[in-house]
Every structure is written in C-alpha cells, then in structure tokens.
Amino acid sequence: MTRIRPFRATDLVAIELQAQQRGVLGIHEPEMNLAHGFALERAGPAYSAEDAAGTVLACAGLAECFVGKQATAWAMFAQGWWERLDRKAVLRALRAGVEHAPYARIEALARAAMPGECRLLQAVGFRRVAPLAQWGPRSETVVLHERLGPVAQAPITQEGRRD
C-alpha cells in the first residue's frame, strides 16, 4: 500500500536519500534537517509517499520563485522507492501536483547522466527544453525541463508559430 499525503518538515529527516542524490549540490547541499524541512514546507505545495509501514520513501514539491507565477520542482527519493511503492500511484500524484499547480511556469532540472531523471520528469508532464553544460558545483550537464500552465503561452518558434 502506498499513502500519499502532504509533506511535513519531519519527512526530510526521516527519508533515507538514495545514494545518487546525495552530494549533488556540493558545498551548497542543504542539510537534511528540520530547518530545511520547514523551508521546503513553506516554499510551496509538497507531498510525501510512504509505504504500509509508514516509512517515507519519496518527497516532492514546488518551490515558488516568483509569487503566483513561477516555481521550481524538487524531489527526493529513498533507495528502493521504485520497488517499495505503487509506482503508478506516485506518478499519478506527481502529475496531478504539476497539472493543478497555480503557476504559469514550473522548471525542473535532471542530470543528463541519469536518464531516468529525465524520463520521470517527462512522465509527470514536463517537456525537455535544453541541456545546460557545466552546471552547478560538479560542472555536470543537466537538462532543463518546463511545464507551462494555462496562464503562460507556448514560446514562439523561429518560424513565428507557437509550439
């Protein structure tokens, strides 16, 4: 059984982050503590997924950048979350969170070296925009993804039409 519920600051302390997500932000990596949990709780809508035993295995949300206009997506997953949770329920919840968000634009980054990250973003409604070379403290290539809400219009192509 998978339970999806609102994110709580204590979830950040409870989740055992999967190895490939640790240290991604180098010296800028936030501490997995209550202070950071409260910051994420205040940043925008967020949810957690737990298994039948109540173990938090996934947390995801949106951090508002420009009030009512733009947010950045974030997600944290525990080792083995894919096998221990109902994947379809988690993906449905993530997609619903993105689709019903009140923002004109939501951005998300995925590491190019981790194709599963890009697939996950696309599965929940983001579209690939552009690779960003030498990004962040590891100078690695990441891929910018976006989800434009109903307030925003699709970008104009070189041919002068909207996507």
Image (spheres, grey):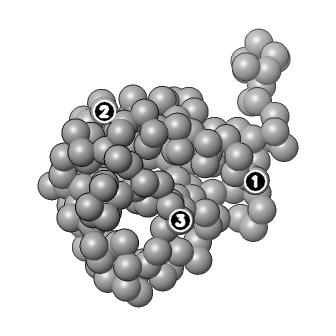
Where is residue 67 shown, x and y percent of the image? 75, 67
Which of the 4 quarters of the picture holds residue 65? bottom right
- Report the residue marked by disc 1: 102
Outermost residue, top side:
159
Outermost residue, bottom side:
35
On the question of residue 90 being in view, the answer is: yes
Q: Which of marks 1 and 2 is nearer the N terminus?
A: 1
Marks 2 and 3, Cα distance to the nearest angstrom? Answer: 25 Å
Image height of 9 relative to 65, above or below: below
Give, as a three-letter code, the residue at label 2: Gly
- Report the residue marked by disc 2: 116
Disc 2 crowd rating (10 Å Cα; few below 14, some 14-19, many 20+) is: few
Give, as a three-letter code, the residue at label 3: Pro
Where is residue 14 shown, x and y percent of the image? 28, 73
Name the mark nearer the viewer: 1 or 3.
Answer: 3
Image height of 13 relative to 156, above or below: below
Q: Earlier in the sequence, mark 2 or mark 3?
A: 3
Q: Mark 1 touching mark 2, by CB under 8 A? A: no
Total marks shown come to 3
